Image: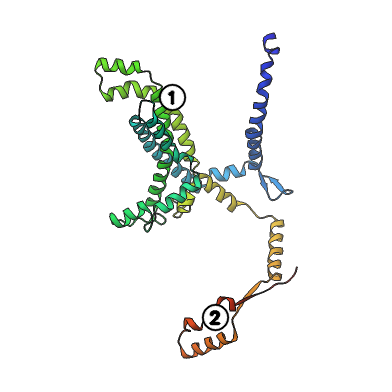
């Protein structure tokens, strides 16, 4: 007992505990507190208990979004993990400038922000200037309209996700391969083991730990994906790309009743909008108005030479003070 009470090293853990409590536990408890209340503003709130949980658990729209989310994450993992392992097996085994260059190039997609990834693929898939879009539309003759066709939207988002995160799986698998001692390969060479036997009985079992970490990380990241599909397809077409967290957010916003204070506020805003009437009138010179009237009577358009110039126009704004 004296060993535990006199060990001052435990005090060194207190800053870490305080940091974790501040960054994780307190925000989590705040979310739990909000989940059992209907918050109107900073001073008006109502305790609703498990009402929000009941609505979400019985919401078919959320169920469909969750089903699509699991399908998307499963398909992404089925492609990313084998592809990442295959890439790791082809990477250089010996240390040198070639290995360093390969690792840097593999890590480049991981350094790009999520919203930039979506913008890159928007340009990449455009049929007029995008490399892949032009190849599909003009060279292959396939009309690839991912913003409006659900299956093409799925293919586009999956290709973007695989391109973005497969390097992470490849780097983790490569780290697992580099940790295997050379004696295993020497013993396999002496026994005359084939390449497949080496991979099945030596490399794959040794990569089990890093592949488990890669699968967990990729499942969590793919399950929380939001920015890239929103930038690429706007979340559509329709609700074919709707995610679980987006569906729950939309349903909560639609299900929240408006309190009397909110209705009164909307009435005040409508009254203010009526009082604060902004009218913009583009006044043209008198000569231009005469020409327009004459042209309208003659049934023809005004020639470009007779149109008023930009510096001849003026904008008049009339407003009421509240």
Residue appearing at x 40%, y 44% in the figure: 158
Of circles 2 and 1, the one toward us is: 2
The mark nearer the N terminus, 2 or 1, is 1
Tell me the quarter of the picture where residue 91 sits: top left
Residue appearing at x 42%, y 27% in the figure: 175
User: In the picture shown, does residue 129 fall above or below 102?
Assistant: below
Residue where numbered disc 2 is placed = 308
Are circles 2 and 1 on residues that touch, CB within 8 Å? no
Alpha-carbon neighbours of circle 1 within 10 Å: few (<14), some, or many (≥20)?
few
Question: What is the residue that sits farthest to the front in this orientation?
Answer: 97
Indicate left or right for 50 with 185 as reference: right
Front-most of 16 and 221?
A: 16
Front-most of 180 and 49?
A: 180
Residue 179 at x, y percent in the picture: 41, 22
In the image, which disc is placed on residue 209?
Answer: 1
The C terminus sits in image quarter = bottom right
Q: CA distance from mark 2 to mark 1?
A: 74 Å
Residue 37 at x, y percent in the picture: 67, 44
Indicate left or right for 187 with 303 as reference: left
User: In the picture shown, does residue 202 fall above or below 124?
Assistant: above
The N terminus sits in image quarter = top right
Q: Is residue 34 visible?
A: yes
SS for callout 1: helix
């Amino acid at each position: 007992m004296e060993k535990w009470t006199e060990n001052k090293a435990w005090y060194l853990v207190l800053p870490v505990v305080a940091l974790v409590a501040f960054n994780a536990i307190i925000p989590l408890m705040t979310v739990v507190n909000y989940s059992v209340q209907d918050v109107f503003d900073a001073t008006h709130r109502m305790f609703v208990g498990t009402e929000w949980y009941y609505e979400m658990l019985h919401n078919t729209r959320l169920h469909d979004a969750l089903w699509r989310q699991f399908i998307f994450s499963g398909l992404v993992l089925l492609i990313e993990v084998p592809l990442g392992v295959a890439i790791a097996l082809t990477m250089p085994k010996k240390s040198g400038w070639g290995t360093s260059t390969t690792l840097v190039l593999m890590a480049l997609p991981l350094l790009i922000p999520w919203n930039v990834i979506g913008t890159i693929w928007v340009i990449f898939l455009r049929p007029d200037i995008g490399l892949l879009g032009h190849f599909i539309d003009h060279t292959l003759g396939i009309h690839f309209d991912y913003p409006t066709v659900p299956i093409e939207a799925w293919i586009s988002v999956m290709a973007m996700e695989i391109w973005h995160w497969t390097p992470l799986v490849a780097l983790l698998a490569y780290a697992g391969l580099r940790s295997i001692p050379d004696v295993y390969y020497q013993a396999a060479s002496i026994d005359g083991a084939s390449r497949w036997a080496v991979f099945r009985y030596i490399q794959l079992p040794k990569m089990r730990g890093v592949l488990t970490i890669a699968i967990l990380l990729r499942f969590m990241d793919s399950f929380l994906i939001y920015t890239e599909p929103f930038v690429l397809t706007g979340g559509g077409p329709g609700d074919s790309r709707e995610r679980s967290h987006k569906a729950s957010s939309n349903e909560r916003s639609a299900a929240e009743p408006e309190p009397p204070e909110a209705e009164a506020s909307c009435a005040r805003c409508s009254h203010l909008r009526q009082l604060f009437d902004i009218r913009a009138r583009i006044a043209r010179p008198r000569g231009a108005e005469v020409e327009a009237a004459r042209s309208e009577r003659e049934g023809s358009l005004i020639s470009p030479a007779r149109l008023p110039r930009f510096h001849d126009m003026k904008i008049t704004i009339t407003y009421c003070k509240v």
